[in-house]
Amino acid sequence: MLIVAVGLSKMIGEYFSKLLIQVNKPSSYVYESHIIDLLPNMVQPKDMVIFISSSGETKTIVQAAEKLRFKNIETVAITNSADSTLAKLVRKHISAYVQRVQFAGYDLSARSTLVVLIDILFEFFMKNYKA
């Protein structure tokens, strides 16, 4: 499983990856743009790539999802925008609504909902798939 997140969502990707590792579910956390660009060459058919993006419009992540769209792998997005470009590019998507907050051209919208969504997914995983 590959977890991909950049910018202010980076720490959330790291959090999710560490949760999975603690229950012996192998995962890698990818946050550097040059490595994200190489993802289409790195993934295998059994891999799952989970993108985490508050806006769902982060250029680096959207471009990676576009490249992976036609590969035979599972792609998932966790965002704060159900109508985002990223949500339309992946096979599965989960989102929560958050009011957008901009300051000096930066997206300062709350990311706490992303953590809540991850915690819910993780709890579901633990109840249904843990050996």
Image: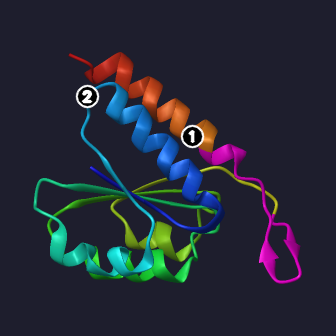
Q: Is residue 129 above or below residue 46?
A: above
Residue 121 in picture, x, y percent from top left: 46, 34
Quick one: label 2, few (<14), some, or many (20+) residues within 10 Å?
few
* SS at circle 1: helix
Compared across the picture, whether 67 is left or right of 43 comes to: right
The kind of residue on which mark 2 rests is Asn
Q: Is residue 108 above or below residue 113?
A: below
Seen from the viewer's position, the closer of residues 91 and 75 is: 75
* SS at circle 2: loop
Q: Earlier in the sequence, mark 1 or mark 2?
A: 2
Q: Where residue 117 is drawn, which disc sits there? A: 1
How many numbered markers are drawn?
2
Seen from the viewer's position, the closer of residues 91 and 26 is: 26
Seen from the viewer's position, the closer of residues 130 and 33 is: 33
Compared across the picture, whether 111 is left or right of 63 comes to: right
Residue beneath label 2, please?
24
Please tell me which residue is depicted at 33% across the width and 75% down the height of the picture: 35
Please tell me which residue is depicted at 24% across the width and 40% down the height of the picture: 26
Q: Where is residue 107, by image quadrant?
A: bottom right
The residue stretch that appears in magenta: 100-114
